[in-house]
Image: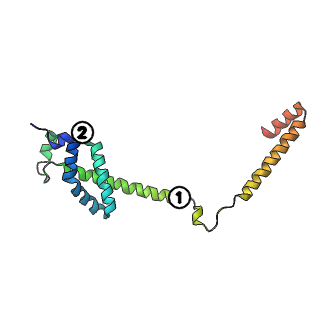
Amino acid sequence: MEPSLRDRIRAGDPEAFAELFAAHARAVYGHAARLSADRGTAEDVVSLTFLEAWRLRERLRPEAAALDEDADVPDGDGLRPWLYGIATNVLRNTRRAARRHSAALARLPDRPEDRDTLPDFADDLVGRMEKAEQLAAARTALGRLRRAEGEVFALCVWS
């Protein structure tokens, strides 16, 4: 007896998976389009659904276990409900990720291109240069002290 489509999919047969796609892609697209009300999103959901189905193929119940439960399923192989479940979860995950992305963008500070002027870093640069000059002068003065005085100064100021 030849293995069923379900069993061939579980075994990782690429031709069986191509048959699955040919038989159910349009139905999965319709399901995703009804849920999302957007053609582009529905197309993405179909792609991700079949990618996820390939990844989850080993969790698919074997033919013998599925026969009892799928006897009244109109598509004959009982795979369409499995794909619909995956598509629904993919769409939920996609929407959840979009909400998180939007929330993260909302938390970002204002972007410079959103303001009329760009920030001026000149004052910050001048302040850093002055501090560098003061540090260099302090090191020069410290170098002029005797060793014991320099150690005391360093311990008092920089420790």
Q: Please provide percent x and percent y for residue 111.
A: 57, 61
Figure colour scheme: rainbow
**93 horizontally vs 24: left or right:** right
Q: Are marks 1 and 2 in contact (CB under 8 Å)?
A: no
Q: Return the mark for residue 146.
A: none
Q: Which residue is mark 1?
A: 107
Q: Position of residue 60 (x, y in %)?
A: 22, 42
Going by the image, does 126 lie left or right of 112? right
Q: Quadrant of residue 4?
A: top left
Can you say whether 59 is above or below 95 in the image?
above
Q: Is residue 132 above or below residue 98?
A: above
Looking at the image, the residue that sits furthest to the left is 1
Quadrant that contains the N terminus: top left
Q: Secondary structure at mark 2?
A: loop
Depth check: give the residue in front, 47 or 52.
47
Residue 72 picture location, percent across and down: 11, 51
Residue 77 left/right relative to 127: left
Identified by mark 2, the residue type is: Gly
On the question of residue 103 being in view, the answer is yes
Circle nearer the N terminus (1, 2): 2
Observer-nearest residue: 118 or 96? 118
Q: Nearer the viewer, residue 89 or 128?
A: 128
Residue at image coords 60%, 66%: 115
Q: Give x and y (percent) for residue 113.
A: 58, 64
> Mark 1 is on which residue type?
Arg
Q: Residue at x 30, y 58 (%)?
A: 43
Which tag is nearer the camera, tag 1 or tag 2?
2
Answer with the quarter of the image where residue 124 lies: bottom right
Residue at 75 percent of width and 51 percent of height: 128
Task: Look at the numbered disc 1 and give the secondary structure of its residue.
Answer: helix
Determine which residue is flagged by label 2: 12
